[in-house]
């Protein structure tokens, strides 16, 4: 991706691995960097980096699963107690929405029905944003280095 100062970007690809024993969680195999215009404008953070080994559940939100694992990883990271930066639930949701729009905008494989797809993406992104803002119980509950067992509540 082009890395333009102050713009939303993903300078490197996200590399994940399914976790044996879990049907829901994956982990990052190498650090994943992202640049958020929302974070830059609000907390003056140029880049954020999610560490290798970070466990998350792709993009699962109550009521439906999504198809933007990068946005899911970024949101899950910002919802952890010790993320860098530490943000509010609403700020984490705004960054999630920012990356949904960014990633949906990169998908040019649906050019044939582009206008219909854009409308669907607009509705889907806003529904997902509302879901992560309203979902109870997960925000600032776990640390960045939490295992999938801790996230799943397995003892």
Image: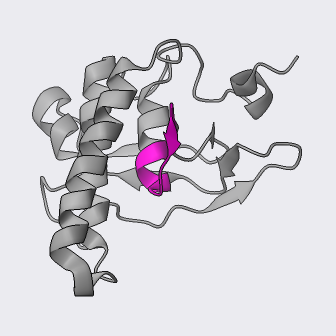
For this orientation, the residue located farthest to the bottom is 112
In-image side of 147 versus 90 (left or right):
right
Name the residue at 52% across, 12% down.
137
Image vertical order of residue 27 relative to residue 82, above or below: below
Q: Position of residue 136 (x, y in %)?
A: 47, 13
Q: Position of residue 76 (x, y in %)?
A: 49, 34
Q: Position of residue 110 (x, y in %)?
A: 31, 81
Count of marks placed on residues: 0
Q: Which residues are magenta?
A: 61-72
In-image side of 65 versus 1 (left or right):
right
Quadrant the C terminus occupies: top right
Residue 16 is drawn in which quadrant?
bottom right
**Does 107 appear in magenta?**
no
Quadrant the N terminus occupies: bottom left
For the residue pair 103 and 84, the one nearer the viewer reads as 103
Name the residue at 51% across, 30% down.
62
In-image side of 99 versus 150 (left or right):
left
Q: Position of residue 151 (x, y in %)?
A: 69, 25
């Amino acid at each position: 991706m082009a890395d333009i100062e102050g713009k939303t970007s993903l300078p490197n690809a996200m590399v994940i691995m399914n976790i044996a024993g879990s049907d829901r969680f994956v982990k990052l195999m190498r650090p994943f960097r992202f640049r958020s215009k929302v974070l830059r404008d609000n907390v003056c953070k140029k880049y954020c980096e999610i560490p290798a080994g970070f466990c998350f559940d792709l993009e699962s939100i109550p009521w439906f699963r999504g198809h933007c694992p990068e946005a899911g990883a970024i949101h899950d990271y910002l919802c952890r107690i010790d993320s860098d930066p530490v943000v509010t639930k609403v700020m984490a949701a705004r960054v999630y929405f920012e990356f949904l729009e960014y990633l949906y905008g990169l998908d040019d494989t649906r050019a044939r029905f582009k206008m219909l797809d854009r409308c669907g993406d607009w509705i889907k992104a806003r529904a997902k944003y509302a879901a992560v803002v309203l979902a109870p119980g997960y925000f600032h509950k776990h640390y960045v280095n939490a295992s999938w067992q801790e996230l799943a509540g397995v003892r």
